[in-house]
């Protein structure tokens, strides 16, 4: 069998007494984890879930949630995690789309979702942050004798809904082979061993926390030490017991805001890894200056897992995401020097769930997938992400890449961060505009001083026609700036 679960099982069985998962004072050895998973798998089967059946899960992070995830893989069913901040109206879209056999949610939400579950013929169970709920009540006391269900590499393991940054979330169909290939490539790239301990502060509903962080560490035989949420002070308290830390860029800016972050505090960590959104050179430099550690920035997406990473041995370059992982090929569409990045490899998904036209539109005839991210690749094979195709602004017929302007504004004294967007404009079609958050501690630039400074470095058509100063940029759970929300907020500015 090529089930990702079988690969995990062989790894954990080889060292059954090692602790592989801990949270809130509880810990599980490899053997205990497998046994607990087998009991949850029996509960799922009793609920009528079988191979290929979808299990949609919206639940707070817990040890029990990890066991439920692994149990779904064990029986060959399909795991469908949902962001815990989605509201009932949004959940309805995902349930209608995924057509699950079972929906597991916060026990407090069962009453709200019951009509939807009844309408779609979905069983519904509760799982609370402490592991309690009707799902836990259904777990048998005895470990079943039945082995894990065999799966082929191409069989579906998960449907991961994309973050919805550029439009409606799409369900990416992820196979057992995709999971295994990416976890293996990451173990090799980041040199992860059974001696590693990952301090895990990420949510479990996104590929970052679930696949990149958890799958990889489990498959390496290492230990995952889970925190319920990211809290800078808690992370600082626990860095001493870990060797790896993974986060989104906001985690690093919040760690830097805590005066307790020092070289001594950071010393036990072998690798600080960052991704899911662009890491600014300012944060990269500040972290290096403060701790002596150079953040390993990597790049990935729901559809492909991790595509590129800066190296463990070798230069880590600010603003770059490094070369592709072993087994992954990248190229720029149409052989351009700057353009849409295309990817091919064993970790790349097979298509969007129930969207054959969208799938066909995003795959080239030779199997490369079009990421929608704009990139350059230098002669050494190092990839730089320069923006998203959908964020590119066309002003008076000329292409403007927001990132080029954002980098200049970000580097100005008194600026915390900037997001550059295109707004509808009667003359230009789209006008370049910047939304800027100022740094409270420093002298505060004005829109006029920012524009004057930009005119020194940019052609006139790239200089923002309006600058909006804000207290906060809207971000989602994975730290991505919600540019669609910004475009909507200022849509009528030039009318
Ligand atoms: P949707 O596809 O629904 O619009 P999304 O693309 O944000 O949402 P995800 O799959 O969660 O959903 O995110 C993948 C995207 O995150 C990538 O396509 C890329 O734009 C961005 N990303 C991830 N890592 C990096 C990085 N290191 N630098 C820049 N961008 C990154
Ligand atoms: Mg995407």
Image: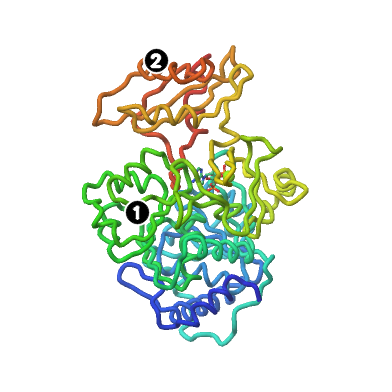
Find disc 2 in the rendering and name its residue: 452
Residue depicted at x 50% and y 70%: 219
Circle 2/circle 1 CB separation < 8 Å: no
Residue depicted at x 60% and y 24%: 399
Q: Is residue 337 above or below residue 183?
A: above
The residue carrying pointer 1 sits among few (fewer than 14), some (14 to 19) or many (20 or more) residues within 10 Å by Cα, namely: some
Q: Quadrant of the N terminus?
A: bottom right
* Residue 190 position within the rendered picture, expressed as x and y whole percent measured from the top left: 47, 61
* Residue 381 position within the rendered picture, expressed as x and y whole percent measured from the top left: 58, 47
In this view, which residue lies farthest toward the top?
427
Residue depicted at x 57% and y 61%: 182
Answer left or right for 329 relative to 274: right
Find disc 1 in the rendering and name its residue: 230
- Residue 369 seen by the camera: yes
Distance between mark 2 and mark 1 Cα atoms? 39 Å
Identify the element where label 1 is drawn: loop
* Residue 291 position within the rendered picture, expressed as x and y whole percent measured from the top left: 29, 50
Upstream in sequence: badge 2 or badge 1: 1
* Residue 300 position within the rendered picture, expressed as x and y whole percent measured from the top left: 54, 50
Answer left or right for 132 relative to 74: left
């Amino acid at each position: 069998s090529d089930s990702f679960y079988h690969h995990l099982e062989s790894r954990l069985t080889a060292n059954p007494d090692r602790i592989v998962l801990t949270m809130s004072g509880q810990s599980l050895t490899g053997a205990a984890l497998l046994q607990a998973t087998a009991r949850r798998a029996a509960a799922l089967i009793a609920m009528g879930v079988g191979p290929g059946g979808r299990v949609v899960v919206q639940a707070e992070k817990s040890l029990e949630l990890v066991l439920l995830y692994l149990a779904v893989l064990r029986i060959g069913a399909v795991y469908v995690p949902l962001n815990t901040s989605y509201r009932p109206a949004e959940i309805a879209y995902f349930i209608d789309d995924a057509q699950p056999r079972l929906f597991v949610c916060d026990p407090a939400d069962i009453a709200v979702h019951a009509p939807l579950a009844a309408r779609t013929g979905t069983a519904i169970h509760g799982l609370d942050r402490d592991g309690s709920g009707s799902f836990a009540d259904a777990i048998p006391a005895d470990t079943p004798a039945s082995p894990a269900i065999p799966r082929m590499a191409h069989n579906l393991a998960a449907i991961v809904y994309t973050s919805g940054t550029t439009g409606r979330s799409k369900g990416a169909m992820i196979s057992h082979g995709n999971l295994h290939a990416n976890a293996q490539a990451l173990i090799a790239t980041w040199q992860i061993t059974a001696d590693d301990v990952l301090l895990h502060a990420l949510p479990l509903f996104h590929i970052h926390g679930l696949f990149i962080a958890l799958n990889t560490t489990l498959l390496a035989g290492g230990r995952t030490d889970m925190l319920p949420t990211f809290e800078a002070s808690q992370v600082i308290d626990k860095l001493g017991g870990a060797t790896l830390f993974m986060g989104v860029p906001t985690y690093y800016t919040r760690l830097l805001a805590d005066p307790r972050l020092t070289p001594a505090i950071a010393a036990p960590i072998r690798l600080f890894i960052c991704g899911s959104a662009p890491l600014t050179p300012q944060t990269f430099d500040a972290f290096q200056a403060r701790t002596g550690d150079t953040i390993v920035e990597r790049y990935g997406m729901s559809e492909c897992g991790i595509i590129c990473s800066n190296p463990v041995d070798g230069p880590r370059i600010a603003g770059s995401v490094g070369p592709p992982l072993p087994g992954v090929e990248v190229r720029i569409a149409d052989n351009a020097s700057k353009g849409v990045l295309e990817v091919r490899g064993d970790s790349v998904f097979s298509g969007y769930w129930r969207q054959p036209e969208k799938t066909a539109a995003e795959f080239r005839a030779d199997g490369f997938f079009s990421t929608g991210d704009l990139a350059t690749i230098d002669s050494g094979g190092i990839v730089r992400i320069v923006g998203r195709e959908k964020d590119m602004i066309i002003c008076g017929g000329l292409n403007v890449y927001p990132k080029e302007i954002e980098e200049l504004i970000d580097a100005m004294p008194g600026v915390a961060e900037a997001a550059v967007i295109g707004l509808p404009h009667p003359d230009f079609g789209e006008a370049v505009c910047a939304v800027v958050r100022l740094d409270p501690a420093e002298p505060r630039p004005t829109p006029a001083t920012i524009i004057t400074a930009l005119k020194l470095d940019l052609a006139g058509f790239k200089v923002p026609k309006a600058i909006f100063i804000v207290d906060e940029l809207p971000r989602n759970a994975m730290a991505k700036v919600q540019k669609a929300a910004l475009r909507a907020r200022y849509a009528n500015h030039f009318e």
